[in-house]
Structures are given as C-alpha cells and as structure tokens.
Amino acid sequence: MLPEHKHQILAAEVKKRSGLVLGPEKGYLIESRLAPVARAEGMASVEALVDAMRMDQRLAKVVTEALCTHETFFFRDRTPFDMFQNVIIPAMGPARTSNLRIWSAACSSGQEPYSLAILANEMGRVRPDILATDISPNVLEKAKAGLYSQFEVQRGMAIQRLVKHFDQMGDSWKIKPMLRQMVRFEVLNLLDDFRHLGKFDVVFCRNVLIYFDVEDKRRVLERIANQLQPDGFLILGAAETVVGLTNAFRPVPGQRGLYAKPEGLAKIAAA
Amino acid sequence: MKTCLVVDDSRVIRKVARKIVEDMGFACEEAADGQQALDYCRKNMPEAILLDWNMPVMNGLDFLIALREEEGGRKPIVVFCTTENDMSNITQALRAGADEYVMKPFDGDIIESKFAEVGLV
C-alpha cells in the first residue's frame, strides 16, 4: 500500500482531474486498479507509478481513468426505467416525447443510454435524442461500438429483449443500428463547463456523484439544473439524494431517485 | 418454499446451480437427463426448472415439449441454461415454451437477474 503522503498526492491529483475522492480506506482499490497500469507502463510498483505521474500529464490521466469506476449494466436497478415509462413520459405529453432530449451522464460503456433507446423503441411514440457522456475516452469507444459480451447482455435483460434489439456476432451481441443511431457519445468531465450541451428534458446522473465531495456534488447538481428544462426530470442512483445539498431540485413524492425542479412538480400532479 | 428442478448431465453444473438457487431461497431437486426430469415432474411439478439442452436419453428441448403437454405442465417456469448460444436455438426454445434463456457460462448474478425477469424472485 502507498505511504500516506503519497496517497495524499495521488488523491489530490485525481480529485483535481475528476472529482473522485480517494479516502484513506481506498488503499485496496488503488492497489487493484493501478497495479495493472504500473505493469503496462513498465513501472516496478504502484508507488513508482505515482511518483512518475507527478511529472507526466498523460500518465496522470491514465491513472485517473483507471481509478474511476465503470461498472454498469443494462436496465440497472430497474426502477429508473419503470419511472421513465410510467411517470416521466406520461407527465411530458405526446408533443414533447416525439422529440425528447435525454442526457445520460457518466454513461460508461453505454448500457444506460442503450437501455433508454430500447425502452423508447418499445413504447412506440417516444423518439429520444440521447446524449451520453463519460470522462473516459476508452470506455466511450466501447460504448460507441455497441458490442457486448455474452455475460454483459444477460444481466438485466430478458431474452426476448436481447433477441429483438441486438444482432448476434459470434459470441458477442451488437445493438441494432436503429437503436445505436438514437445515441450520441461525447467525452465530458462533469467538473468542466457543460453549458454547450444545451437544455434537456431528462437527465440521468446515476452513481457518479457518490464519488464526489459535498462541494463538488452541490456545484454539479446546480449546473445540471441550468441544463434542465423547467419541467424536466433528474434521476439519481438509489443511494443518492439532493436533499441538504441544493434547492434547485425537489424529490418527486413516492418516486425514489426522481427529482424535478420546483416549478416542474406541478406537472406530475396534473398527469 | 418453491422448488427449482436443475436438469443437467454435468454433476459439477448441478452442484453450482444448486448453490445458486438455494441461496435464492429455493428447494433444489436434480435430474441428469430429460427423462429423469419428466419422471420427477409427473410426480411433483416444480415451480421453476433450470434446463440444459444437450443431455443423453432425452435432451432439454424434447423434455420441454413433453412437459408442456403434461397435465399442469404449463405451470413451471422454464429457464434454459445451455452452451447453445445460437439465435436459432434461442428461438426454438422460446417457441417450445421456454420462459427464459441463459447462455453458459453463467454466474449467480445472471441467474438471479433472469429469475427476476420472470417473476420468480
């Protein structure tokens, strides 16, 4: 494990670059994520890697990305997708849903935005324009390819869905072109300015803010609020909340993980 | 307690599957081929069946076709669990009355996810 002062150097660099907070209890994570990187870079140890990273921007980026968690799977947690179908779409109305702007922030290898594309396709009258962003260019390349392993397509997806929306390519499965085209991918660090993205009707930002400290969390949430239509919706991960952080969003009563702007809450009541 | 019948000619697979389904709260029964499975079902229809395809005596597809013809045979939820991962196998299985399809290799997460899809958990 890294000596404490080097852990702090690493933590400061990574936090600066990505917002990710590496507390002292993350020694195991650091070791398991960075040992392969150290080997690939020809370094003798993780400590040597951290030393070298201080002088090398490219290395600092590689290290940061390796520490960011990329775990995701199709229809993860199920509930947000049920909410999309049963609460959000009805609240939006047909005129809106024929051209719905959705942002899947921290999309990792793409299962979340593709799940939304699948759902929209199944619902029929929903035509989304999905923007999916992530800090990691490598992981985004995988997302763009839309090619998934047999393992990846079996978790979270009924077989009927797999057969309907994917083409089999050997042992891998590729999302069908029509669904692939519903999603645009872009590299984005949530700590950077994202005003150029425009305004969205729905933002999914699940299980990424948990890695940020309170100040960064608050700032990102408030900036997301600026990118959301007045009656738009925000969906966070099951363990997350805006309560105590910002008044830009209010929880939607009875819908765990669903948030709306104060002026938007009335719309759901009316739907 | 619901019963899951694990049908596979590999004892190793049956052992792994048993651990997974017992952890999910099912009582587990085993059969080494389709005929044994059919004999068991004729005595006691299980709530769930994890079904291999390639087995001696009677394979999984033939068992499924026979099962659905049995009295009460539409009741069990049948999840194929097989190395056959071709689209044509999948469609054949679904047409014969399978509820879900797991391609080997699998892990506990996949089985649990598929069982959730069909309302077993």
Image (spheres, rainbow, N blue to C red):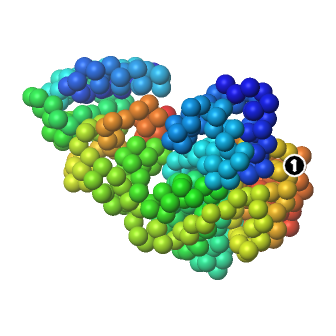
Say if residue A266 shows up in the picture. no
Q: Residue at (59%, 73%) from the top-left corner? A: A129
SS at badge 1: helix
Q: Which of A43 and A206 is in front in this view?
A: A43
Q: In this view, does A187 lie above or below B57?
A: below
Q: Is residue B120 above or below residue A168?
A: above
Q: Residue at (46%, 68%) from the top-left corner? A: A179
Say if residue B54 shows up in the picture. yes
Q: Mark 1 lies on which chain?
A: A
Q: Residue at (43%, 72%) from the top-left corner? A: A178
Residue B88: image location, x then y, percent: 21, 54
Q: Which of A208 and A78 is in front in this view?
A: A208
Q: Nearer the viewer, residue A266 or B86?
A: B86
Q: Is residue A146 left or right of residue A185?
A: left
Q: Is residue A34 above or below residue A141?
A: above
Q: Mark 1 points at which residue?
A: A215
Q: Would you identify the image quadrant in which residue A161 lies?
A: bottom left
Q: Residue at (59%, 31%) from the top-left corner? A: A45
Q: Would you identify the image quadrant in which residue A267 lies?
A: bottom right
